[in-house]
Amino acid sequence: MPAKPFDDFRSLLAALPPADDAAGARVRALFAKADKPNESLGRVEDIAAWIAAWSGRAPPAINRPLVAIFAGNHGAVRHGISPRRVAATADEVELCAAGGAAINQVCIANDLGLKVFDLALDIPTGDVTEEAALDERGCAATMAFGMEAVAGGADLLCLGDLGVGNSTIAAALCAALFGGQGTDWVGPGSGADAATMARKAEVVDRALAFHGSGLGDPLEALRRVGGREFAAICGAILAARMEKIPVLLDGFVATAAAAVLHAASPGTLDHCLLAGLSPEPGHAKAAERLGLRPLLDFGISHGEGVGAALAAGIVKAAALTSSGMAMAVRL
């Protein structure tokens, strides 16, 4: 029987490497010996142990943190689901390249690498209300492209997105994976008014009705009602798992993409932490369903991976704390 485009990814999902629990335990032992009250650093100790377990290094060290932003456009934007023009996605990519975006400043402050990936912005995905966003081959190819985000090396991966209208697509994907209708998952996105919110919910409902039973398989849901940035983020998460790279997820879009992998194989996100919660009501719901507790709650809806880049500073500090504290002299 001929191989299908998703077969390689299904094989990866069935053979994910586990955490190095011994490395995590060694970090906890270091904290227990440090000159401080036991467990007094709270979640900082948990984060350091998590880094060690998923990098396989104890004490952990983060020397090559990377922010990867995936940018995509969507055919469903023609239904008026965003107050912004489609060309704004390309404008934001250019702003990042010029160093003038918010993410550039946070990366400088926290000493993070930055890559921005233009995912065929001049060719929007299919309109999910009447066709699949991507065919299987195109979706698989975009997932494979996303895996290349870590090809140059990284020891912490922060995942973000750019894309006009993609909060509606995230809502459709969450509705397909978790159930519910458009009004359960859509939010204001980039400043949507009441009429735009109604159109967003209608697009989600029309997409669910059109694709119907085809949404039962998570990877099929990804290609039918997702988009290129969602597929690329899925690929990047998988590549990071295979390469022992801990991941920070930023925003509703990255969380919705991660939900695809969780639905396909429940342990797939164990090497991921949620950087923060956006104001999108669907984001909090999705995070709760996935059991992801945010590191930050700054109300950031900007995208660009800003929340993950901010949280990376905390993760870097946790790693350094586990190795740099003086040991107590116990009498």
Image (cartoon, helix red, strand yellow):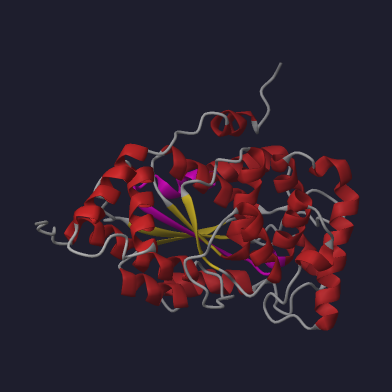
| Of residues 84 and 270, the one drawn nearer to the viewer in this rendering | 270
Q: In the image, which residues are magenta? A: 145-167
Q: Please name whichever residue, 318 or 216, is drawn nearer the observer in this view of the structure.
A: 318
Q: Is 90 located above or below residue 60 in the figure?
A: below
* On-image quarter of the N terminus: top right
Measured from the top left, where is residue 225 in percent x and y?
A: 76, 52
At 24% from the left edge and 62% from the top edge, which residue is drawn? 321
Query: Considering the image in quadrants, where does the C terminus appear?
Result: bottom left
Residue toward you, 7 or 250: 250
In the picture, measured across the screen, residue 86 lies left or right of residue 202, that is: left
- As rendered, which of 298 and 211 lies closer to the eye? 298
For the question of whether residue 8 can be seen, the reply is yes
Left or right of 325, for residue 210:
right
Residue ID at (70%, 78%):
84
Q: Is residue 320 within the magenta segment?
A: no
Q: How far across and down, in percent of the image, does residue 220 sit?
A: 74, 41
Q: Residue at x 81, y 57 (%)?
A: 127
Identify the residue at horizontal 68%, vertical 37% (top origin): 137
Image coordinates for residue 157, horizontal then vertical, percent: 42, 54
Q: Is residue 294 above or below residue 136?
A: below
For residue 26, above or below residue 43: above
